[in-house]
Amino acid sequence: MNYPVGDFLIKIKNAALAGRKEVRGERSKLIEAVAKALKDKGYLSEISKDEAKITVKINFSKKNPVLMDMKLVSSPGLRVYWSVDDLEKRKGPSLFLITTPKGVMFSDEAVKKRLGGEIIAEVI
């Protein structure tokens, strides 16, 4: 496993598309921060942790997952960094999951706080 955060996000995406309600993955501080950001936006309904694993429950609305699609932007071999100006130029329905000096957040919150950082994924 070279990119644990990417693997965890893809597990969530695949589980949502398959209609599964729960996903378990390896636990790290970054993965916990990503899960918390997804929960704050309403994509996840619950987060529970034990010593080595994290379990998240996917939020559903009318039997359909709230999370429609997710695409990884950064990878271990190619990290993608955007400034706040680059984030402001992006229009459309998708949001970007970003690691900033102030923690993991979505692009709309990062623009309000005037922060840039590494783009982890695009969430639609």
Image (cartoon, helix red, strand yellow):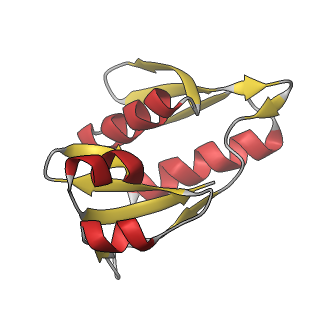
Nearest to the observer: residue 60 or residue 106: 106
Image quadrant where residue 36 sits: top left
In the image, is residue 77 above or below residue 75? below
Outermost residue toward the right in this view: 63
Quadrant of the snapshot with the C terminus? bottom right
Judged left or right of residue 69, residue 90 is left
Horizontal and vertical percent for residue 75? 40, 73
For the point 60% across and 63% down, the residue is: 92
Outermost residue toward the left in this view: 101
For the point 43% across and 35% down, the residue is: 35
Judged left or right of residue 90, residue 11 is right
Horizontal and vertical percent for residue 53? 41, 29
Horizontal and vertical percent for residue 78? 35, 82
Outermost residue toward the bottom in this view: 78
Quadrant of the snapshot with the N terminus? bottom left
Q: Is residue 2 visible?
A: no
Nearest to the observer: residue 2 or residue 100: 100
Image quadrant where residue 62 sits: top right
Judged left or right of residue 26, residue 28 is left
In the image, is residue 105 above or below residue 59? below
- Number of labelled discs? 0
For the point 24% across and 63% down, the residue is: 117
Horizontal and vertical percent for residue 33? 31, 37
Judged left or right of residue 89, residue 117 is left
Q: Is residue 84 visible?
A: yes
Image quadrant where residue 116 sits: bottom left
Nearest to the observer: residue 41 or residue 48: 41
